Amino acid sequence: MKTRLPYLALIVLPLAGLTIGRSAALDAGDGTRYRINAARSRLTAQVAVGGVFKGLGHPHVIAIQKFRGEVQANPRITGSGSIRLTIATGSLAEVGKQIKAKDRPKVNRAVHEEALETARFPEAVFKSTQVTVKQAGRQQYNASIRGDLTLHGVTHSVSFPAKVRLQGSRLRAQGGFTLLHSDYGIKRLSAGGGTVKAKDEITVSFDIVADKQ
């Protein structure tokens, strides 16, 4: 492969199954539903490079541009709440400032065809299985989220923290976590006969906004 960098893998995300105390503004009979607002949200993944000539490569920043999902929370039942997030893997695109515009199509093609194999695996899905939330301030919470991430045809449990804020009829969650290419059978892209190669770690960052339904 002639690309000189890594790629990313997706991922993402967060904000899973929220459960907050009865006094929280997440009101609601059988549960309050929030729909993820992709236009106001941000999901990115970064991959660093290694190898003998790693100084000739550049870390990659990949934006996940198309995703949808929903959060449901019931403040009356401890441990209740859920999230499902579905990502279109073909929407991943290099946005790092260190990559020249003329090189972006080649990088994106390698990410889609060689790494993520988006024709075979067009979607990645995260489904929450457990969530713990503690109040950290007025309308602010610290969440610990666990769920199953299906990526590149492989499913693994992932867990990560998130800072959650209620803003009127909106809910916002921010945080990050790390995945490994090797856990999901994803090819680590390389160049120069392997002298520059993507590292195994993929660092995912999220800033998710969801609107009350």
Image (spheres, rainbow, N blue to C red):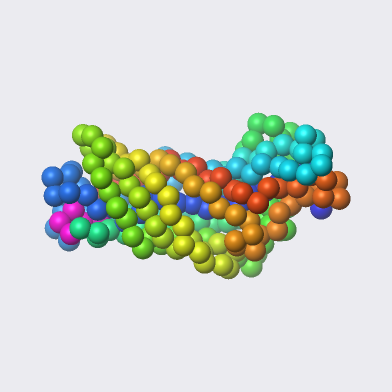
Q: Is residue 158 visible?
A: yes
Residue 143, given in percent of the width and then of the height, sits at: 33, 47
- Give the magenta range: 73-77
Residue 182, quarter of picture: bottom right
Residue 101 in sight: no
Name the residue furthest front: 52
Q: Is residue 190 left or right of residue 201?
A: right
Looking at this view, is 114 or 154 the one in front? 154
Which SS does the magenta portion mostly show? loop
Residue most extreme to the top: 97
Q: With 104 as the anchor, is 122 left or right in this view? A: left
User: Residue 181: percent from the left, percent from the top?
Assistant: 63, 56
Horizontal side of residue 27 vs 184, given as left or right: left
Residue 74 covered by magenta stretch: yes
Residue 179 x/y as whole percent: 56, 53
Q: Residue at x 50, y 56 (%)?
A: 87
- 94 lies above or below 181: above
**Residue positioned 55% across, 62% down in the render:** 151
Closer to us: 145 or 24:
145
Judge whether 46 appears above or below 91 on screen.
above
On screen, residue 50 above or below 69? above
Residue positioned 65% across, 63% down in the render: 185
Tell me which corner region of the image, top left, top right, bottom left or bottom right, holds residue 30. bottom left
Q: Residue 86: within the magenta?
A: no
Report the residue that reaches farthest toward the right: 193
Residue sitting nearer the eye, 50 or 164: 50
Q: Is residue 188 above or below residue 48?
A: below
The x, y position of residue 183, in whole percent, is: 60, 61
Which residue is depicted at the point 38% across and 44% down?
162
Numbered circles on residues, count: 0
Left/right of residue 89 with respect to residue 198 in the rendered view: left
